[in-house]
Image: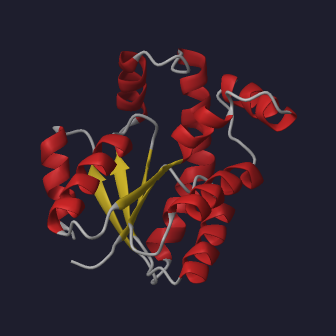
Amino acid sequence: MDQRTFIFIGRSGCGKGTQARLLSEYLEKQNPAHKTLYISSGSELREFIKGETLTQRLAKEIYDKGGLQPEFLIVNLWAEALVKGYTGTENIIMDGMPRKYHEAGVLDSIFDYYKIPRPLVVHLEISNEESTKRLLARKRFDDIAEEIANRLSWYDTDVVPTIEYYRKNKAYRLIDINGERPIEEIHKDIISQL
């Protein structure tokens, strides 16, 4: 199996991180020569806002309100992860990115720069109600009802157009996966699409 690239996209709490981890394990078992570079916009951002610079403090204010970060900041976080971690041999799994339509275009330029074939886009579908239930159950510090409602509202206004960009762009293959099923069943469904 050759080197592969994937984008996981879906509502908060849809299981992107879990499925990304399972896919990474599967890919590395199939071909141990290709390690996986896992880039999670949420994880990168949560780490970033621990700092004390002006940019980090402003990003934390947005984060604490459940808002959507400016494109330049998120793109910078991805770029830094790629510059530091990509050697040209890894599988790449991108979790929760891009979140805005314009970010998808920037990501296109990254794929062109590194000569990375267009990734498989895995859209994990869950309802607003299921997302809210899962986020409240995981009890992470940023998962409170008001912030969850904010995140779900910008999902509809910002992320859905991005999903449609991938759905209509012939350079990409987007698969819709029902995310309201058992974890292993979802994983098998994704593997069957490879």
Identify the image's colour scheme: rainbow, by chain, secondary structure or one colour: secondary structure
Which residue is rendered at x = 21% and y = 77% of the image?
1
Residue 124 higher or lower than 30, as above or below? above
Residue 184 higher or lower than 76, as above or below? above
Query: Which quadrant would residue 127 be assigned to in this image?
Result: top left
Q: State left or right for residue 21 relative to residue 164.
A: left
Q: State left or right for residue 179 relative to residue 165.
A: left
Foreground of the two, 80 or 67: 80
Foreground of the two, 146 or 81: 81
Place of residue 95 in the rendered image (x, y in percent of width and height, measured from the top left): 45, 51
Query: Which quadrant would residue 28 be assigned to in this image?
Result: bottom left
Q: Quadrant of the C terminus?
A: bottom left
How many marks overall?
Answer: 0
Place of residue 87 in the rendered image (x, y in percent of width and height, measured from the top left): 48, 71
The residue lying furthest to the right in this view is 54
Which residue is rendered at x = 45% and y = 41% of the image?
11
Place of residue 185 in the rendered image (x, y in percent of width and height, measured from the top left): 13, 46
Place of residue 7 in the rendered image (x, y in percent of width and height, measured from the top left): 43, 61
Which residue is rendered at x = 62% and y = 29% of the image?
150
Residue 161 higher or lower than 45, as above or below? below
Q: State left or right for residue 103 relative to residue 179.
A: right
Query: Which quadrant would residue 192 be assigned to in this image?
Result: bottom left
